[in-house]
């Protein structure tokens, strides 16, 4: 397959060359590269599992023959399913690392304070009662500004998120990035690992860090009651309106006090952040207060941008996976297959977000299914 490189897109199809074929050489009729390309295209075009990928491939057989060798014709959905169940997820994801690195390098000169949000999500219908397995839980790293999935790790339980996050951090480049994680990842070793890799951390602080949380909350409340007369504080307010709701978020950014219990145990801990969200909808007002600890120096707008960015993994990735890619409806039970399909969906979102048009991700995915020329544009390829 010939690959064309555009100024605004980098072809991903060239990155499968080093992927080791996990299948037995006996009765191996289909090329690994053909199967991978079909899987990527199928998911981009609207397929959510091996059966749908196979149906899409048969419907586009003539088009696929312009690009692929297909020595034994279009593979069955069973063949695709067996491959996805055999591929080791780590090796499969590694094929895309160069593509991801190329996009991050392309924007390196113009992007500062890249926010990398790390968060977990359960594949709700991936449970397997026969094997006493609950839903597969995936921890993802998401580049907020670029709209790129940087990596993922699968665990069997949400409680394993704490051990998965350091492994995921080891796989991604953090230099000069701000890493945001919810309260489950607010751990000393995770904070230290982020700093050691050249990044800054912004970690949500809740009751799982009992003494530190209570100390920070008591101190901040005391400063608020004294109108911050004995400490430095930076404030910033944002207001957004939409769907009949008005949200006002007031951010406070303060230096860590010397009296904060356990502060010295957190590497490069410098500031405490507070976000007070007031929501007004249908005449009813609600308030939510969130606390954060960070290695960032004092700078409330920077803190606000990073905190807001973390919510982006819910809005830009998880919501899109649930609504547009129907991830929670997937009934794939095999752990490797479920993990690999989940990565294909995250990668598809990343590809679709690189398109320079005004359409939503849902509409871009429909367009990729309706129009093979648009699908070619997303993949940046041309026929042999």
Image (tube, helix red, strand yellow):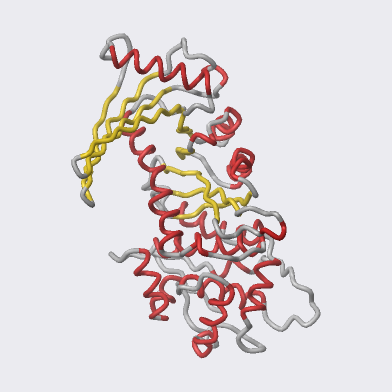
Task: Identify which residue is drawn at 26% across, 38% down.
Answer: 279
Q: Is residue 109 left or right of residue 164?
A: left
List x then y, in percent, for residue 155. Answer: 63, 49
Farthest residue, direction right:
26
List x then y, in percent, for residue 92. Answer: 63, 62
List x then y, in percent, for residue 341. Answer: 57, 64
Above or below, 341 against 1 in this view is above
Task: Identify which residue is drawn at 41% across, 23% down.
Answer: 272
Above or below, 247 against 253 in this view is below
Q: 335 or 195: nearer the eye?
A: 335
Task: Identify which residue is drawn at 22% across, 43% down.
Answer: 281
Q: 231 or 124: nearer the eye?
A: 124
User: Where is residue 223, by image quadrant?
Assistant: top left
Q: 244 or 55: nearer the eye?
A: 244
Task: Identify which residue is drawn at 51% across, 70% down.
Answer: 48
Quadrant of the drawing holding the N terminus: bottom right
């Amino acid at each position: 397959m010939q690959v064309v490189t555009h100024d605004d897109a980098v072809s991903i199809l060239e990155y499968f060359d080093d992927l080791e074929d996990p299948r037995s050489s006996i009765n191996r009729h289909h090329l690994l590269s053909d199967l991978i390309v079909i899987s990527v295209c199928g998911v981009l075009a609207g397929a959510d599992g091996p059966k749908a990928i196979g149906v899409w491939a048969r419907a586009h057989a003539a088009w696929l023959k312009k690009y692929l060798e297909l020595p034994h014709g279009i593979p069955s959905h069973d063949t695709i399913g067996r491959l996805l169940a055999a591929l080791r997820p780590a090796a499969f994801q590694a094929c895309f690392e160069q593509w991801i690195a190329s996009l991050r390098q392309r924007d390196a000169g113009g992007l500062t304070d890249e926010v990398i949000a790390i968060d977990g999500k359960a594949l709700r219908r991936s449970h397997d009662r026969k094997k006493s397995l609950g839903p597969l839980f995936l921890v993802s790293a998401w580049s907020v500004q670029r709209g790129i999935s940087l990596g993922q790790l699968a665990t069997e339980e949400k409680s394993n998120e704490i051990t998965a996050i350091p492994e995921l951090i080891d796989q991604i480049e953090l230099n000069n990035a701000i890493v945001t994680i919810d309260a489950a990842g607010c751990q000393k070793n995770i904070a230290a690992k982020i700093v050691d890799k050249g990044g800054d951390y912004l970690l949500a602080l809740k009751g799982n860090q009992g003494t530190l949380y209570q100390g920070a909350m008591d101190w901040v409340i005391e400063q608020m009651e004294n109108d911050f007369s004995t400490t430095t504080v930076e404030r910033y307010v944002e207001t957004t309106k939409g769907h009949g709701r008005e949200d006002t978020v007031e951010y406070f950014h303060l230096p860590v006090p010397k009296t904060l219990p356990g502060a010295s145990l957190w590497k490069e801990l410098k500031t405490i952040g507070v976000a007070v969200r007031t929501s007004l909808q249908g005449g009813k007002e609600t308030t939510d207060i969130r606390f954060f600890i960070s290695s960032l120096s004092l700078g409330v707008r920077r803190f606000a941008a990073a905190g807001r960015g973390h919510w982006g993994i819910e809005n830009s990735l998880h919501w899109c996976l649930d609504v547009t890619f129907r991830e929670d409806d997937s009934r794939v039970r095999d752990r490797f297959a479920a993990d690999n399909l989940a990565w294909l969906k995250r990668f598809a979102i990343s590809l679709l977000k690189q398109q320079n048009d005004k359409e939503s991700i849902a509409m871009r995915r429909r367009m990729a299914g309706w129009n093979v020329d648009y699908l070619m544009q997303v993949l940046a390829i041309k026929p042999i």
